[in-house]
Amino acid sequence: MSRKGPKSNIASKVYLLLFFILTMENTHGFAQGNNSKNEEIHEYRKFIGADDKQLKVGDEMVDIPLGTVINGHLEKTKFSDYYDKLIILDFWTTGCSNCIAAFPKMQKLQDEFNEKIQVFLVNSFENEEQISRRLKQKHLQGYSAASLPMIVNAVDLLKLFPHLGVPHHVWIYKGKIVLIGSHLNTYSEKIKALLEGRVITFMRDDNNSRSYDEDDAPYFKLIDKYTSSIVQYSSFFTTHNNYVAPLGQARVTKDTIAKTSRYSYINFDVLELYAKTLSERYREKWAGKLVGPNNIEYLDFFVLNTEDTLSLTCNYLKNGQTDEQFVKNHFCFEQVVPQDISDEERRIYMLQDLNRYFGNLLHTECLLIPVKIPCYVIVQKQVSVEGNASGMKNGGRDSDSVKYLDCQLSDAILNSLTDLFRKTATPRPYVFDESGRKIKGDFTFPLWGPADNLDSFKSAIACYNLDIVKTERVREMLIIKNK
């Protein structure tokens, strides 16, 4: 298997419009200009014929046939046949690995509530043959929809519930639309509340919500009256805003008249806000870090001396998150500062503001302190191995290999390490590259298996005259503790 250069971080959000354009067979293209998100949504709805048919929360569900249903033998063929059940429509595509990975969760909910609900997996863009073929691809093997019925090529449902991204969930109960929004809404406690007649709240879907980029006005002008005053310096907070970029967005705006810069962080969790206080000078001190203990990089800069991590982030939850958990630790922060102050000074002010706000709200404080951390370091060997690296494969192993083409050796090492931690039970330590090797070319590493570990990696890099050693390093870290 071959890869061109280093991997890049790919946003997890899947846009159905792009999926529709790039992967559908025998369809007409849909040209995209430099439209705003609102214009994009409008054009998309118009393109699929949804403008006159789109339903919203509170509307009556139209009585239409289910359509083409696979993976289930249902005697009921219309939505009205399920009047006494909570219907959950889980929109997905084969291009969305998060959607597919959530199938077991949806099956578990179906089993838990049995005859009280009916979950339908809804694919509006692909037919049965396309789904079957794409699910056979290597990276999707092993995924199954279990016994959940799947509505395919569901064009009529797409017109009723247009959406730009998946997963996207719709709840229908007693003939009415009761929820349209994020998949985070769908969990046992909320379903139980609805079935018991209690009022529920829900989180809107980020893919169909107003984008914060739609207005050039400051964030606070979207939630308060307009003011004619020129703001020279300000900082303020709100809790999670369900109506503007629910899943998080940041923006910097320069005001040439007021000579100020406005930094807006909309719907970020507490730890991510604190991570935004770290300057480039700070990050330079971490230069050479290849990987850390966490899948999300900014978490590597933190030491949490508090048991209540859920008030700070949902990223440590092992069983997924709900909308209520999500909104409780997400906040909005906006800072306006004069343009003549340095970026490092601005970030110090931001750290002070965060400590004042969360110190009062959560009774915590965050300090930047040097910490001695256990780690592994990649170094050059004292004595070069004989021969040249390009002639040696797999660190001497006779097994399948991965080739990283036309890239830096450090990038190939990073990708191989990431692959090792992903495919094995090896705990993720801090790993720093202090080898100083600046080599560009084609590099070969083993295709890791479950039995591999860092000793295997040590053998694999030996042919490049490198070694990996266990040691300690001192780095400044953000320490969060109770006050």
Image: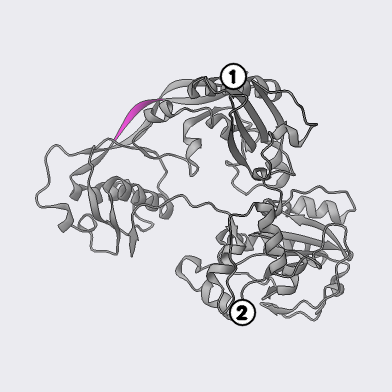
- Where is residue 255? Give x, y as percent: 60, 29
Q: Are marks 2 and 1 in contact (CB under 8 Å)?
A: no
User: Which residue was labeled with disc 2?
Assistant: 128
Q: In the displayed image of the protein, which residue is found farthest to the left?
A: 386
Please tell me which residue is depicted at 58% across the width and 42% down the height of the picture: 315
Q: Nearer the viewer, residue 244 or 142?
A: 244
Q: Nearer the viewer, residue 204 or 340?
A: 340
Asked if residue 5 is positioned above or below residue 291 in the image, the reply reads: below
Q: Is residue 137 magenta?
A: no
Asked if residue 249 is positioned above or below residue 257 in the image, the reply reads: below
Please tell me which residue is depicted at 69% across the width and 23% down the height of the picture: 230
- Kindly report the secondary structure that dominates the magenta region of the rendered protein: strand
Side of 470 relative to 113 (left or right): left
Side of 395 relative to 28 (left or right): left
Real-space Cα separation, disc 2 to disc 1, in angstroms: 56 Å
- Where is residue 104? Give x, y as percent: 63, 62
Query: Which of the two marks, 2 or 1, is nearer to us in this view?
Result: 1
Magenta-drawn segment: 470-475
Q: Amino acid at mark 1?
A: Gln
The total of numbered circles placed on residues is 2
User: Which residue was labeled with disc 1?
Assistant: 352
Q: Amino acid at mark 2?
A: Glu
- Where is residue 142? Give x, y as percent: 52, 68
Which SS class for mark 1?
A: helix
Please tell me which residue is depicted at 76% across the width and 61% down the height of the picture: 170
Q: Please tell me how crowded label 2 is: few (under 14), some (14-19), or many (20+) other residues with Cα within 10 Å.
A: some
Side of 42 relative to 278 (left or right): right
